Each structure stands twice: as C-alpha cells, then as structure tokens.
Image (cartoon, rainbow, N blue to C red):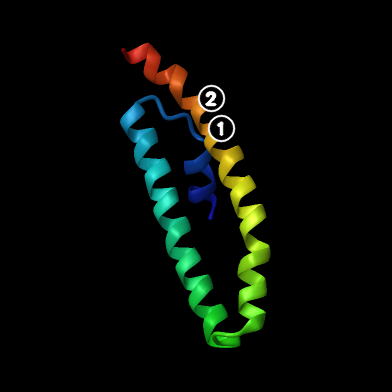
Amino acid sequence: MRRAFDFFHREIAQVHAAALVLGAAGLISRLVGIIRNRLLFAEFGAGRELDIYYAAFQIPDFMAAVFLLGAASAAILPVFQEYL
C-alpha cells in the first residue's frame, strides 16, 4: 500500500511517463465503471430504479468531467508548450 501511495506522490519528469500514468488511471476508471454498472444491473435489473439512478448520475458525472478536463488542460498545456 505504501508503494502505491509513493508512486502517485512522486514527481514525474518526462511528459510521456505522465501521459502513461494518466492513461492508465483513465483505463482503470473505465473498467471500475463497467464493473459498477454490471453489479447495479445484476442487483436491480432493467427497470425504473436503475433508470432513475442513471438519470441522477448524469449531472454529477458531467460536472466532474468538466472540472477534471479543465484542471488537466490547465496543468498539461503549459508543459507541452515548453517542449514545442
């Protein structure tokens, strides 16, 4: 556990290494989302409750995506400009 904690708190000097970490985190996030959706479908089935959950999940999911993309753009674009 400590090694994983240290991995995410170390400074990454190369852009390609940072991109690899971001890509891997995105892939893991998508896989966990698929597992979450499968578990929800197994528990509730295709019905009203699951539709309500998905509808209620859309707004927070959209807001998180907007803020994360904005933060990532603000952090990554200056680094890319240095390399150009």
Q: Which mark is residue 74?
A: 2
Front residue of this view, candidates 41 and 76: 41
Q: Residue at x 50, y 64 (%)?
A: 33
Secondary structure, mark 2, is helix
Q: Residue at x 34, y 34 (%)?
A: 17
Front residue of this view, candidates 61 and 80: 61
- Locate residue 73, reporting x and y percent: 49, 28
- Locate residue 47, reporting x and y percent: 60, 85
Residue type indicated by callout 2: Ala
Quarter where residue 84 is shown:
top left
Q: Residues within 10 Å of mark 2 (few under 14, many from 20)?
A: few
Q: CA distance from mark 2 to mark 1?
A: 6 Å
Q: Residue at x 40, y 42 (%)?
A: 21
Query: In the rendered structure, are the residues bearing label 2 and label 1 in contact, judged by CB atoms less than 8 Å apart?
Result: yes
Relative side of 82 to 68, left or right: left
Relative side of 64 to 77, left or right: right
Secondary structure, mark 1, is helix
Q: Which mark is residue 29?
A: none
- Locate residue 66, reporting x and y percent: 58, 40
Q: Compared to 45, does 8 lie above or below?
A: above
Relative side of 31 to 53, left or right: left
Residue type indicated by callout 1: Gly
The residue that disc 1 covers is 70
Q: Residue at x 61, y 75 (%)?
A: 51
Relative side of 56 to 27, left or right: right
Q: Compared to 51, does 14 lie above or below?
A: above
